[in-house]
Image: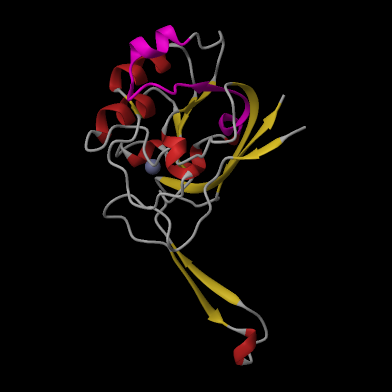
Amino acid sequence: MRVYDISIPITTAMTVWPGDQAVSLQRVRKIEDGDGANVTNVSLSAHTGTHVDAPYHFLSDGDTLEAVPLNLMMGRVYVLHLPDVSLITADVLKQAEIPPRTRRALFKTRNSDIWARGEREFQKDYVALSADGAQYMVERGVKLVGIDYLSIAPYQQSRPTHEVLLKGGVLILEGINLTEVTQGRYTLYCLPLNLQGVDGAPARAILVGV
Ligand SMILES: [Zn+2]
C-alpha cells in the first residue's frame, strides 16, 4: 500500500491567495526562555494551502463546513492527468474518458510543477476548471472535485465555476500537490479541521494506491 501525501506544507513563506493574510506561526512559549513547553500560535486563512471550500464560501445561504458529510471526502477517487491543457472545459472532460460512476475526481495539471519547483510567487495563469466544465461534472454526478492550485476557478473569474459546483452539491478541494501521482484510481482521505460555521478549512489530504 503506497500513501501519497498530496497536501502542501504550511509555512510562513508559502503562497497565499492575493489579498489573503500570510500564515503566521508564532512560538509564544519557549523552553529555552524558561517556559515549561513550546507553544505556537497559528493564524491563517481558512483557504490556506490544501483546503476544502464549503458551499457557504460562495453561497450566502449555503451550508457551512460542519454540515458537509465526511464521507464525501473519503473513498474512491479518480486522478485525471491533463498535462497539455490551460483551461479544463466541458469539451476537454468529454474527451478525457473519465471512468463511469466516478464520484470524486482530482485534476492533475501543469500546476503541480509550480509546487514541484518550489515557486512561491502567486501564479495567475494557473490551470482551472471553466464554468461549463463544472456543469459537466455536476451532470456526471461527481460529488468532489480537486485541483492542484489554490483555486478551482480561473483567476478573477472565481464565482461562475464555484457557484455551479457548490449549487450542484460538489465539494471543492483546492491546493493539492499531485506531482508524485499518476493518472488512475486511488482512495482519498481528506480531513479538514473541524471548524464550525466556516466557509472552508485547511485539510490533510492523502491518496492511497489501490
Ligand atoms: Zn478555497
Which quadrant of the picture is home to ligand 1?
Answer: top left
Residue at image coords 59%, 84%? 30
How many numbered marks appear?
Answer: 0
Would you say 135 lies left or right of 83 here? left
Q: Residue furthest bottom?
A: 34
Would you say 90 lies left or right of 83 here? left
Camera-nearest residue between 8 and 205: 8
Asked if the magenta segment contains residue 205, the reply would be no
In the rendered image, which quarter is residue 153 located in? top left
Q: Position of residue 197 (x, y in %)?
A: 43, 49
Is 110 above or below relative to 12?
Answer: above
In the rendered image, which quarter is residue 165 located in? top left
Camera-nearest residue between 195 and 149: 149
Q: Position of residue 133 (x, y in %)?
A: 35, 18
Span highlighted in magenta in the image: 71-96
Is 163 above or below relative to 98?
Answer: below
Residue at image coords 49%, 19%? 142
The C terminus lies in which quarter of the figure?
Answer: top right
Instruction: Indicate how the structure is coloured in the image.
Output: secondary structure
Is 107 above or below relative to 180?
Answer: above
Q: Residue furthest front?
A: 117
Residue at image coords 36%, 38%? 151
The N terminus lies in which quarter of the figure?
Answer: top right
In the rendered image, which quarter is residue 189 located in? top right
Q: Position of residue 171 (x, y in %)?
A: 46, 31
Q: Position of residue 170 (x, y in %)?
A: 44, 26
Q: Residue furthest right?
A: 1
Residue at image coords 55%, 73%? 40
